[in-house]
Amino acid sequence: MNHSVSMLRIALVVVPLVVICAFASAEEQKAKPKTCVTSPDDVAGLNEAASTNVNAIRDFKITAHHMLEQEKFGQLDCLANSLRTSKERFPGGLWKLHSLYIGLSTPPLHPTAQDWAKHMALVNAWVARNPRSITARIVLAESYNNYGADARGTGFADTVSASGWKMLAESSHKAKNVLDQATKLPKKCPEWYYAMQLVVPDLDWEPARRRALLDEAIKFEPGYFYNYRIFARYTQTQWGGEPGETKKFLQEEADKIGGEDGDIVYFQVANELICGCGSDSDLNLSWPRIKSGFAATEKKYGTSMENLNLMASMARAFNDAVLANKLFQRIGEQWSEAKWGSSAYYDGARQWAKAMAPIQEKQQAVEESAAAAEATPEGMRYKAVVVEKFHEWAQACLDEMGSDSYKSEWIVQISPEGRVEHMFHQGSSVIMNCLGQKLADIHTKNEAPFPPAPKPDYWVRFDFDPADFSRTAAK
């Protein structure tokens, strides 16, 4: 963040409660609260409006690290104590305390070896100056962890050098020792559990021990959803988890919490896991519940430009152009570089949503119409006749083209005369293409292969499984 630019805005800034806190010690708690952050530039950087500025949380983290570089250790301790006590969140529900730790535990941008050396020296100096600071200890542990992860790199295991593995192991060991020492301090922090879970994968803990750590974290601070996030990360298959484990874990934990709060946790964890890449299909998370969690989050914590970007990205990953288009309209030019990478990619996603939204809205409307029709006894009887005829064509395709393992979803509009008016289908295979061509030919020849539909604009939906016709059923 440009601190000289921030100075121009300071006349408009009213110092909020986030910069007010009490001292940590019992003796100091008897004193009157004091201002934690004294620099107007720092005050501005810590209090940008996350509801309208997509860079507000990023600037909060940058400002925190700027304070670390200036060795404002006392102010950082005071600020962390205040945020820990107040549990203050940004609009959108992110904890300011966690963002503070992120800003303090990694050098900005793309750190070099020299940047890391300087950073570690600063954090160690903070611990030395205030050895009773729980904040400094956790920052040191997370810094060790992040340094080790940086040395390892982001490639697959077989691409990591021997020195990379060695530095990761050494850093994890140091982080674990720091966190163990921190348990002796009088003050406790929910971030301690998050930091400990970061090093767990390198400690070869048994699953039961990992779970016990999470349970302890939840008991200490149920609302600190970052502990759910980090546990869920290591249930994924790329981290040694079993197929379906992540989905089961997240669903069970959200159900245990229940209601809108459970949906909020589901959303906050899912938005960390969904990457818009091939591994998303392995997670098989519930898109309706993610949407419910996003709505509940906005209802409880207000609008966040970061959440809007996250949700738009997930809507793209789940091929929900209708919702994505609405979100992009709200985002406008407040797009997140961290999420989209470039304006070209962001604009491409916006154009996709704008083009596809009308098509999907039409499909949603016909699906609702088909579901309403099937809800009646007459509709169920009529659908059975349509499906039987469809199976005749499918069998002919199978006889002609050979076996096929692909399932498909079909929605067909039938006229009062029994003609095929329109159709939608999802999926692509040889058999699906054959069926689609047969229906297209029937439509072109104006044939009426079905009995008259019960009413105009009549839609029938069914699922097709070439392996077992008897399992064909509407959703």
Image (tube, helix red, strand yellow):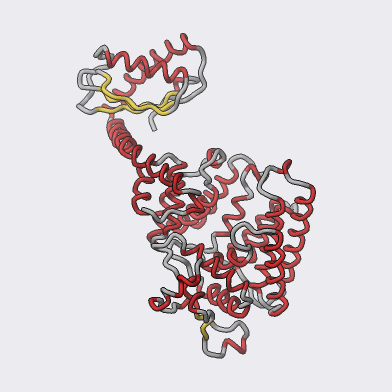
Reply above or below: 146 against 180. Answer: above
166 or 10, nearer to the observer: 10
Reply above or below: 9 against 35. Answer: above
At a point 29% along the width and 33% down the height, the residue shown is 366
The number of numbered discs placed on residues in the rendered structure image is 0
For the C terminus, which image quadrant? top left
**Is residue 46 at all visible to an observer of this figure?**
no
The picture quadrant where one finds residue 305 is bottom left
108 or 414, nearer to the observer: 108
The picture quadrant where one finds residue 16 is bottom left
Q: Where is residue 132 in the image (x, y as percent from the top left)?
A: 69, 78
254 or 434, nearer to the observer: 434
**Is residue 113 at all visible to an observer of this figure?**
yes
At a point 47% along the width and 44% down the height, the residue shown is 286
Q: Residue furthest top?
A: 400
The picture quadrant where one finds residue 134 is bottom right
Reply above or below: 461 against 347. Answer: above
In the rendered view, does 355 fall on the left or right side of 465?
A: left
Q: Position of residue 38 (x, y in %)?
A: 52, 81
At a point 43% along the width and 24% down the height, the residue shown is 464
